[in-house]
Amino acid sequence: MTSTSAAPGGRLPLPRLLAFSLGSIPAYMLISMTGVYLPPFFAGKMGISLTAIGATIGLLRLTDLGLDLILGWLMDKTRTPMGRYRPWYLAGLPVLWLAIYKVFNPPADMDTTYLFVWYILLYVAYSLLVLGHSAWAATISGSYNERSRIFGWMLGMGVFGSSFINALPLFTHGRIKPADPTSIPTIGWIIMAVSTVCVIAALLAAPERHAPVASKDRATFKDYFAVFTNPSMFRLILADLFLVLGPGASAPIYVFFFHEAKGFSPAEVGLLLIPYTAAGIFGAPIWAWIAQRIGKHRTVQLAGLGYAVFQTILMIVPAGMFWLTALSMFSVGFCGAAFIVLIRAMVADVADELRLTTGQERSGVLYALVTLTQKLGSSLAVTIIYPILDAVGFVAKPGYHNSPAAIRGLEMCYVFAPIILVVVGSACLIGYKLDANRQGEIRRALDELEARDYAASVEVLGGPGETITAKAS
């Protein structure tokens, strides 16, 4: 079997890239459910108070605060015939099965303890899938622009999976609706089946290139400290946190906002998420293309400005106007697509910089940091926003008629909090130094080291049982 994988500076053929990108779908399905539909499900049908849900999810984040860093460190240390990261990615699948079954099929008398235990296992599955897939993706190519392409397609496929969840009312003629509590168990089974297919497809489609053996036998404390003090990574972590907090602040109250404030039915609420998530399919490759011309960090800033403008327009759209609201949601989602894909592509560049300066592979730890900001940002949004809704008198029970003051508080939380947070996140990248020119210099230096240490050859892992030696450039 001949490998068609990307060389360190080459391109992964499109068919393999598409199959590899399918591996993003399980995590994005989880993001859609945990961020938008599950909190209202627990607050409405299961009867848990908004404040209790916010506190529980906040406690979850404190409990697993170091989990991603530990997993990232273990991944970087792993050596198997499959590679460093692919075994961990595969391990996320059975964990996902168990966690989804428990979370999507809660007993009638469930309490916050049940929610805490099984939700944390769901986060473990998410971490294994996202960390394994992202760090693996960073090994496929060392090219500044090719990484934008890879992560762009990963996001595009991910939001396709999220859009599939939101389009279930169309596919099932209204029998399965994510915003309908009675549909949650069925959706859980659907996610398990789709995830199984996507994980297997990704494993068979793309290689994991062996990272060069570290130039140091053992990492020192200084090497690990360099991960957290690297100026580029510090900016990325800070920017990513605020860029996650922005959309994350609106996600857990999305159902409330469009049903209570905008007057849409539960079926329409789910359908309105389709243009928002589907916008990422178009936005990811377009933003990646723009990044190749003006740089990744400048593209993130441009997208942040667009997000603020279109989020404001969304507030102005009159209630009940479905198609105008759908267009506004598409515009917001289009801009938001830039955040995840480009930040993660920039992390791969930082991994190269650290490997050059420390002689150690740190992709797993670096992606653990941004995965941590993703989970921390989304949970902080619930922890902060839900108690605010309680304070303004908003009641989440189905059929309850909230006061105009409560609805107004809901609107303020949904529209303006994300704008402020995204603008702050974009501002964190002002003066960012690790651009295409600098990354090119780093890549050339690494290629020289690899050529010297490996006698001008790089070992590549292909599919199962496939090992190929490719001439280094």
Image (cartoon, grey):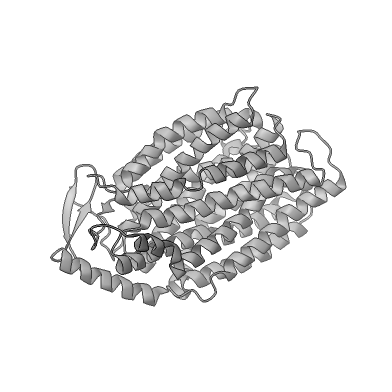
Query: To which quarter of the image does residue 305 belong?
Result: bottom right
With 378 as the anchor, is 291 left or right in this view?
Answer: left
Is residue 12 visible to the viewer in this orientation of the structure? no
With 4 as the anchor, is 310 left or right in this view?
Answer: right
Viewer-proximal residue, 418 or 282?
418
Seen at 32% across and 72% down, the residue is 442
With 430 as the anchor, is 312 left or right in this view?
Answer: right
Viewer-proximal residue, 398 or 373?
373
Seen at 65% across and 45% down, the residue is 252
Residue 428 image offset from top left, x and y in percent: 56, 69
Q: Name above or below for residue 322 compared with residue 221.
A: above
Q: Name above or below for residue 431 compared with residue 424.
A: below
Is residue 328 visible to the viewer in this orientation of the structure? yes
Residue 467 image offset from top left, x and y in percent: 18, 49
Residue 214 image offset from top left, x and y in percent: 25, 60
With 381 as the anchor, is 186 left or right in this view?
Answer: left
Q: What quarter of the picture does the C terminus occupy?
A: bottom left
